[in-house]
Image (cartoon, coloured by chain):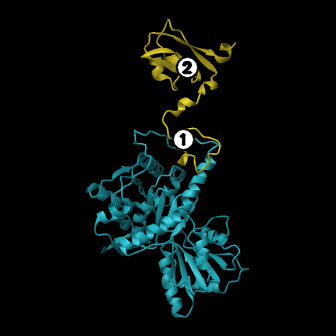
Chain colours: A cyan, B yellow
């Protein structure tokens, strides 16, 4: 390992460079642009053998990825916000064709009004699309998650596309120090060769991908996707452990930070988790028994394991950096709450940071105070940080 | 491959993949026909333009010679009749062709 300073975008690009995928189909969008910009320099300099395809839109980018992956190539793209939204229909094609495309998504708020800053509305909007979703707390995690994503997505019992998130600007454009493998070969030994069992360029074994289904077979094919998702958790854990042996940093489906004796636990995803850790440390110094559950694997959603991890606490504050209009309470909150059915944990939803509205250590301590003084009969959701 | 009774999500091919080539020949689209292509062998000069342009596989060819219209696949689009330089194919309403 060597320790260097990189922005989140550069860290993800470095990971892609070391993996050396066969094809990248790309279209720019702030704040992802510099990720592929950096990667394209690696292509131009001959540091990778990737075929870089510049397309005319994100819809085309994902369409090209589907064609490339179906042909048998290890394929990647990258996007944000409305770019992900423009790809929306093809996301479902990628997952239903069982193509292990890997895509960093630099989280940015969905327009409108137009906003280039960070929230999770984009990847939350894709949570039903059948893609694996791994959330990154910092540049190190973005780098490590991108490398692991190939082993997870390409696993023969999975074969599903995977998104690796990193918060826009907060992570993508902020420089941090992280450890990277000194040698591309070490990464490639870990990711291995991509050896699809069926690929369209195999002219000795011709087959058709993506034909018409009618009422008679669609349901069975969707059930197959469900089964593939059910296989993901164990593999995320195995790959995370193996990666730990190789790099010294192991990964799991979530991280439990000072939760063992916590009476109140905060749940969050992405870069805010880092800020919460500082808030937890501060509150612990003041004698408050608070902890953080940082969720890494959002899809598939490990509901039962989350509830087990939260079971020592009486109160849980779920922080959502996204809002589902018409639903009282954020998406992460509701997914946890439905698995908490039957338990007596008091859960509350805190929607924060929409459109990149800052969230500070001080505000997090206020959220914890609010949670402490809340009762189950109170409003289920609070919008934290909005001007009333 | 044939789908059989008892096949479910566990046994059906992954993602709806059709694992053999050329299976469209098993689907007899001729049943949809509203016009029928009628071939006049006398006028035919064996240029095979109809064979090249047929969007389905309705022109029967053996040893590089056209031998007839395959009614299992002819849907009556009329492209062959339109294209034939020798007017060797005529389109006739399907109902009129049946006794």
* SS under mark 2: loop
Residue drawn at x 68%, y 17% as measured from the top left:
B95
Q: Position of residue A73 (x, y in %)?
A: 39, 50
Q: Is residue B28 left or right of residue A38?
A: right
**Disc number at residue A211?**
1
Tell me the tag on residue B70.
Answer: 2
In this figure, what is the number of numbered marks? 2
The percent coordinates of residue A109 (x first, y second) are 52, 64
Q: Are marks 2 and 1 in contact (CB under 8 Å)?
A: no
* Subunit bearing disc 2: B
- From this view, report whether residue A313 is shown above or below residue B4: below
Residue closest to the eye, A249 or A48? A249
Question: For the point 50% across and 23% down, which residue is it?
Answer: B54
Q: Same chain, marks 2 and 1? A: no
Q: Chain of mark 1?
A: A
Q: Cα distance, mark 2 to mark 1?
A: 25 Å
For residue A184, which quarter of the picture? Answer: bottom left
Mark 1 closeness class: few <14, some 14–19, many ≥20 residues within 10 Å: few
């Amino acid at each position: 390992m060597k320790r260097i300073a990189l922005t989140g975008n550069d860290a993800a690009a470095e990971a892609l460079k070391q993996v050396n995928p066969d094809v990248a189909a790309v279209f720019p969008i702030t704040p992802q642009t510099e990720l592929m910009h950096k990667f394209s320099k690696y292509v131009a300099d001959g540091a990778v053998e990737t075929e870089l395809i510049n397309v005319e839109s994100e819809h085309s980018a994902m369409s090209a990825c589907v064609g490339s992956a179906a042909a048998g190539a290890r394929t990647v793209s990258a996007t944000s916000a409305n770019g992900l939204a423009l790809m929306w229909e093809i996301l479902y094609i990628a997952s239903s064709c069982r193509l292990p495309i890997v895509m960093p998504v630099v989280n940015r708020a969905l327009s409108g009004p137009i906003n280039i800053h960070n929230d999770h509305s984009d990847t939350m909007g894709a949570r039903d699309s059948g893609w694996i979703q791994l959330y990154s707390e910092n540049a190190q995690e973005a780098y490590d998650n991108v490398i692991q994503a190939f082993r997870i997505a390409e696993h023969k019992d999975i074969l599903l596309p995977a998104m690796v998130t990193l918060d826009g600007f907060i992570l993508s454009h902020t420089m941090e120090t992280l450890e990277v493998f000194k040698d591309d070969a070490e990464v490639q030994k870990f990711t291995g060769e991509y050896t699809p069992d069926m690929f369209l360029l195999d002219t000795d074994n011709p087959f058709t991908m993506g034909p018409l289904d009618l009422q008679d077979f669609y349901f069975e094919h969707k059930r197959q996707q469900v089964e593939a998702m059910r296989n993901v958790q164990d593999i995320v854990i195995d790959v995370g452990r193996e990666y730990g042996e190789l790099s010294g940093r192991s990964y799991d489906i979530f991280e439990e930070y000072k939760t063992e004796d916590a009476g109140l636990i905060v749940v969050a995803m992405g870069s805010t988790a880092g800020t919460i850790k500082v808030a937890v440390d501060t509150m612990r110094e003041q004698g408050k028994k608070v902890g953080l559950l940082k969720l890494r694997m959002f899809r598939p959603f490990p509901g039962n394991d989350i509830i087990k991890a939260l079971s020592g606490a009486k109160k849980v504050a779920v922080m959502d950096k996204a809002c589902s209009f018409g639903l009282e309470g954020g998406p992460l909150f509701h997914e946890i709450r439905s698995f908490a059915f039957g338990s007596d944990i008091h859960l509350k939803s805190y929607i924060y940071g929409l459109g990149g509205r800052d969230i500070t250590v001080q505000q997090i301590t206020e959220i914890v105070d609010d949670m402490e003084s809340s009762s189950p009969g109170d409003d289920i959701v609070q919008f934290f940080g909005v001007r009333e | 491959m044939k789908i059989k009774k008892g096949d479910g999500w566990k046994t059906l091919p992954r993602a709806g993949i059709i694992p053999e080539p050329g299976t469209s020949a098993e689907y007899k689209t001729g049943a949809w026909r509203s016009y029928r292509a009628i071939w006049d062998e006398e006028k035919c000069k064996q240029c095979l333009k109809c064979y090249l342009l047929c969007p389905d596989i309705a022109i029967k060819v053996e040893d590089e010679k056209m031998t007839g219209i395959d009614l299992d696949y002819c849907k009556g689009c009329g492209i062959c009749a339109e294209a034939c330089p020798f007017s060797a194919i005529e389109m006739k309403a399907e109902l009129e062709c049946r006794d």
